[in-house]
Amino acid sequence: MNSFLGLARMRRSVREFESGRLVSREDLLAICEAGRWAPSGANTQPWHFVVVDDPALIAKVTQVFVRQTERLDANVPKFPHVHKKFLANTMAIIVVCGDPRYQAAYPQSEASAELKREYAENSLRIWLVGLGAAVQNIQLAVAAAGLTSSWLSGGGEDTTNRDLQKLLGYPDCLRAVGTIPVGVPEKGIASRYRRPLGQMVHWNKYEPEKFRPDEMVDHYVKEVRQFAMYRGEENVSKWDDADKRLGEWRKAFTSETIERG
Ligand SMILES: Cc1cc2nc3c(=O)[nH]c(=O)nc-3n(C[C@H](O)[C@H](O)[C@H](O)COP(=O)(O)O)c2cc1C
């Protein structure tokens, strides 16, 4: 358990890689093998792993993501993101493509329009979380191989998915739900902000004092998110600017229950 926890803690999203490093296909296959063993609804395994290890193609995938970031700059104000040129330095890029047709394999109902909607909506969730499990298994395998990755969901938007599809040749009906660059980190791997464990664990029933009110969530989105995404310190109390960033919610971010102050 300890070694698994160590791996789970060590897995990090890294967006700066050393250039000129290589990875063997054997290692890449072992990483994909971890994805293969992910759980999925009704054991549908609704994924394909398109592994790009040809440097010329890595350069082209990088260009797709550079355009994806430019669209983000133009259309999504204030979202803190990193320019995707870093992808050029990866050893390989694994594009996890989901096959949405498998949603039909999850529980569906024709009993009424409302039930049809209810089950169809849940099918989408079942499909997505299964794909998330595959991406996570791949990320953990990358960390176990002593490498680093990140998890790019940007790329699932229609425009970028179409660009990727044209470049990589996957069928129209598939969708790139996660892109995982694999490489050697340029700097040591830092930690990252995490909420205290006690704030998210509820014993036997939901503990209402742990519920975050809308104002706190709004505060997170507006004032904390851009720092929480990239800071290398797990514990917000240790941030030099904790007072400034957390404001009246400091206590709520750092203790086990949610109180202002
Ligand atoms: C569903 C999902 C989507 C994500 N999308 C992106 C993305 O598009 N670009 C990116 O740089 N990081 C993305 N990330 C990585 C998160 O920003 C990262 O996991 C988070 O900041 C915590 O950092 P850590 O992974 O180093 O622990 C995504 C992570 C998940 C789980």
Image: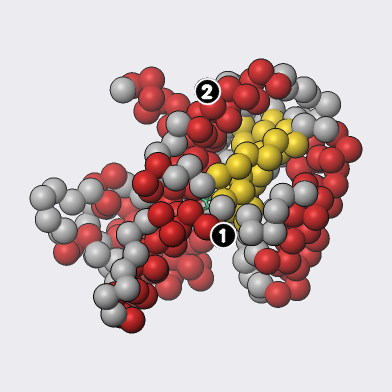
- The residue sitting at 43% across, 59% down in the picture is 104
Residue 180 visible from this viewpoint: no
Q: Residue furthest left?
A: 204
Q: Residue furthest right?
A: 56
Residue 9 placement, left or right of 82: left
User: What's the amino acid at mark 2?
Assistant: Ala
Front-most of 136 and 223? Answer: 136
Viewport quadrant of the C terminus: bottom left
Q: Are marks 1 and 2 in contact (CB under 8 Å)?
A: no
Tell me the tag on residue 86.
none
Disc 2 element: helix
Query: Residue under circle 1?
Result: 226
Q: Residue 50: where, in percent of width, then height? A: 68, 40
**First in sequence: mark 1 vs mark 2:** 2
Q: Residue 98: where, in percent of width, then height? A: 57, 51
- Badge 1: residue crowd in 10 Å (few <14, some 14–19, many ≥20): some
Q: Residue furthest front?
A: 110
- The residue sitting at 65% across, 64% down in the picture is 157
Q: Residue 246: where, in percent of width, then height? A: 42, 62
Tell me the tag on residue 144.
2
Q: Nearer the viewer, mark 1 or mark 2?
A: 2
- The residue sitting at 56% across, 53% down in the picture is 99
Q: Residue 25: where, in percent of width, then height? A: 70, 21
Disc 1 element: helix
- Residue 228 higher or lower than 24, as above or below: below
- Residue 52 higher or lower than 199, as above or below: above
Q: CA distance from mark 1 to mark 2?
A: 28 Å
Residue 148 placement, left or right of 253: right
Q: Judge: label 2 CB < 8 Å from ligand 1.
A: no
- Badge 2: residue crowd in 10 Å (few <14, some 14–19, many ≥20): some
Front-most of 213 and 93? Answer: 93
Q: Residue furthest bottom?
A: 113
